[in-house]
Amino acid sequence: MNSPTLSLVDLYAPIRRDLVIAQRIFDDELVSELLIVNGLCEHIQSYRGKMLRPALLLLSAQATGEVSSTHHTLAAVVEMVHMATLVHDDVLDEADERRRLPTVCARAGNVTAVLLGDHLISHAFHLCSGLDSQYASRRIGATTNTVCEGELLQNHFRGNDRLGEAEYFDITRRKTGALAAVCCELGASYAGAEESVVQAMYAYGMSAGVAFQIIDDVLDIVGDRRQVGKTLGRDLSLGMLTLPTIHCLSSASPATALALRAAVTGKEPYHPKQLRQWLDEAGSIEYAVSAATSHVNDALRQLDLVPVSDARSSLVAMAEFIVERHY
Amino acid sequence: MNSPTLSLVDLYAPIRRDLVIAQRIFDDELVSELLIVNGLCEHIQSYRGKMLRPALLLLSAQATGEVSSTHHTLAAVVEMVHMATLVHDDVLDEADERRRLPTVCARAGNVTAVLLGDHLISHAFHLCSGLDSQYASRRIGATTNTVCEGELLQNHFRGNDRLGEAEYFDITRRKTGALAAVCCELGASYAGAEESVVQAMYAYGMSAGVAFQIIDDVLDIVGDRRQVGKTLGRDLSLGMLTLPTIHCLSSASPATALALRAAVTGKEPYHPKQLRQWLDEAGSIEYAVSAATSHVNDALRQLDLVPVSDARSSLVAMAEFIVERHY
């Protein structure tokens, strides 16, 4: 695929109007009677991204039943939750740019970033609690619990060179997989799909989410900085091992492993080009991409239960798209 | 009153067992399957305070009807919301001690404090969404929206010497009043009280909450550091005007006002003892305490609709207690 943005537009075709409605609900929910708050919320605009989670939710609904107004609200809710994690992640990562724009953090200080993230998460729950049934609120609450645990775990392992694959996948399932999974689950569940289909959609979202995170972690090291829109090589500089570096530690020569350990524990500085060389030598990028591909295949298998439709085709293509991103 | 802690124990007598149940629900909600997360949550223990908000909720229920299991859950929810604001406030204030113990922030870094605050707010909503009705979730969500707006407003006015009384009260109603108000409202509402009583209880909580914040702001300047358990004089050093300093700016001599403006805008350093002298000369402490007393009287008037009972007596005494704290 030559232009990822264009491709997503195509994939979103079956739910284009639903996404517009969800976006309007999102915007309406955040309007405040206070001009100052509205001004601050403009910072959030720069976090607008690919609307992947609302798209997953709406496509899952359409592929397994019918999109309703509840889905539109839920699509806005999951995007709000996702944005809250982005804003707070920036405080955590001290990232100075994201999506090629200065972060809330860099522009308005850590304090505003903490408050705006809180503002988003509060409005997400407020919006969700306006639905007729408590079920979605309960599921979203359980999911944000899990996301927080993933973030706490990840932070706990910062600067720790003993983070293994099992811990990495545990963190990734919680931090990224859980929200994608609940999007697909709620989409199917509120479309009236059978329990087996709802579970399959959850599993699709989980596997796709994990694959997405693995590729994100790969792109953090080998991506085109202009396309990724973030500072490169940040994970290691923040003391965080990811699947490629975990593989490299266990497969590289003793000298390389030693240097990599010194880098993750912050004992020795390293150069991003050096890191790339270590990973290339150990075949760690290929290893991580192949793990992502395997998760994508797991995701695709879950769609066996779903009848053929444009929405289903988009779900297939979205999963395949994950490993086709540029790196 | 000689010992504030002992007095609160007395005031809580009508709901002592209910508070124990609420505390158990609070603890159970935060138990994680992850040992690491449980370890981090131990930091939260140090934020345990006077359980004022759960007490307001339970006393309001008992004074206007009967305490139910829903009230126990809601009491845990409001305490969780309150603690989340404390933890994130510490990131914002860079406070290095609270309740005479090092803050989460100082001990585990800003990152963990942001994540633990998120963890608490997520669990608060998760716990609330387990109730049969959506009503409480919706009210709690609306309240946290308001609290966030209060915090955003307050942060916006940092370092600004033109914050006036109107803005101060607007911030205070949102930041502190709203949560206390919704505690009393939900207590009465879920006890089956009439709408007029529910509204009166909301107004009681709002006025009591604002009075509490005014005295908190007074104690920040003139309190006994050991009793307040926080670093003194922080508001001004963080560039935040509060009712006493706002009054002083408009009432003190031009020379004093100039020095105070320089202090709040961070142009000139100041000594806490100097601040105290400025405020004493302008009668600003008395002014603020009298404003708090007036709010307490407003709160007490709201209880006219509530029949005599031990719980009502406690609500009266809790309001009176606000202005009797040591300063």
Image (cartoon, coloured by chain):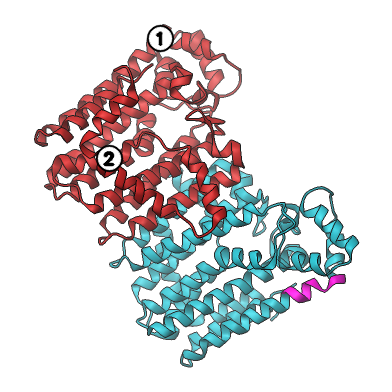
Chain colours: A cyan, B red
Q: Is residue A55 left or right of residue B71?
A: right
Near-viewer residue (A40 or B57): B57
The C terminus of chain B: image quadrant:
top left
Three-letter code, disc 1: Ala
Say above or below: A141 vs A311.
Answer: above
Say above or below: A27 vs A37.
Answer: below
Whether residue A282 appears in magenta in the rendering, the answer is: yes
| Residue position marked by numbered label 2 in the rendering | B181
Question: Residue B263's spot in the image, x, y percent?
Answer: 55, 19
**C-alpha span from label 1 to label 2:** 32 Å
Near-viewer residue (B73 or A294): B73
| Residue position marked by numbered label 1 in the rendering | B282
Q: Is residue B167 left or right of residue B105?
A: left
The segment highlighted magenta reads A281-288
Near-viewer residue (A6 or A119): A119
Q: Secondary structure at mark 1?
A: helix
Instruction: Using a 10 Å C-alpha cutoff, classify the residue at mark 1 as few (fewer than 14 neighbours), some (14 to 19) or many (20 or more).
Output: many
Question: Residue B86's spot in the image, x, y percent?
Answer: 46, 38
Residue sitting at 51 percent across and 67 percent down? A179
Say above or below: B233 vs B125.
Answer: above
| Mark 1 belongs to chain | B
